[in-house]
Amino acid sequence: MALSAFRFGPISIPLEQVFLISKLSYALVNLKPVRPGHVLVATRRPVARFNDLTQSEVLDLFTQAQRVSKVIERVSSAESLTLCIQDGDKAGQSVPHVHLHVIPRFEGDFATNDDIYDALAHQPRVDNPERTPRSANDMASEALRLREEIGSKWNEII
């Protein structure tokens, strides 16, 4: 049976919103990004906390995050990137599944550099209706563009 979706905590992510797949991780576009180009890299196994990952999962998560960061920096013409993990509810994790944020950064995008962490931690949570979700079509289009940027190696399991 062909893969049609990934689990992201309690959420089903359609394959059309995924732009990179490895044996242990996948990258997806963000339903409610903090900045344009904000994407996520998640483990394939639904694990809530970083310390519960295997060594192989940690290695693959960061390997794929590096691949994704190169693409995001290039396609967004970003000057820098913020890469971060919110590990647990008190750290601002809104989906109980280990995932790494890749966020393009530009001079002046926040009043001070560390304000991005306030944006991640204090904006209404992803499950809050005040945060307007993107359309499925917009997300699928972005994922397709990113797959094309990555090339034929976007899916390492086929």
Image (tube, helix red, strand yellow):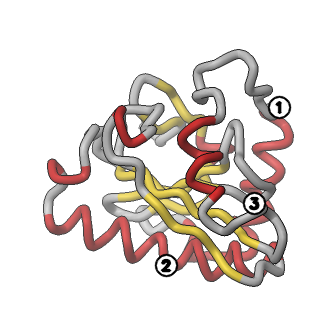
> Separation of disc 1 and disc 3 at Cα?
15 Å
Residue at figure coordinates x 46%, y 57% from the top left: 100
Circle 2 packing at 10 Å, graded few (<14), some (14-19), many (20+), is some
Measured Cα–Cα span from mark 1 to mark 2: 27 Å
Name the residue beneath numbered marker 1.
Answer: 135
Q: Is residue 71 above or below residue 133?
A: below
**What residue sits right under mark 2 in the picture?**
66
Which element type, helix, strand or loop, lies under badge 1?
A: loop
Residue 24 falls in image quadrant:
bottom left
Sequence-first disc among 1 and 3: 3
Measured from the top left, where is residue 8 in percent x and y?
44, 35
| Residue that sits furthest to the front in the current view | 112
- Give how far across and how far down residue 107 sits, in percent: 81, 77
- Disc on the earlier residue, 1 or 2: 2
Tell me: 24 left or right of 93. left
Q: Name the residue under label 3.
A: 37
Q: Is mark 2 on a helix, strand or loop?
A: helix
Q: Distance between the residues labelled 2 and 3?
A: 15 Å
Identified at 52% across, 65% down, the residue is 155
Along the polypeptide, which appears first: circle 2 or circle 3?
3
Question: Residue 103's x, y, as percent?
Answer: 65, 63
Q: What residue type is labelled 3?
A: Gly
Up-down: is 24 above or below 28? below
Q: Which residue lies furthest to the top in this view?
A: 129
Dot 2 amino acid type: Gln
**Residue 121 or 39: which is nearer the viewer?**
121
Say what secondary structure mark 3 lies in. loop
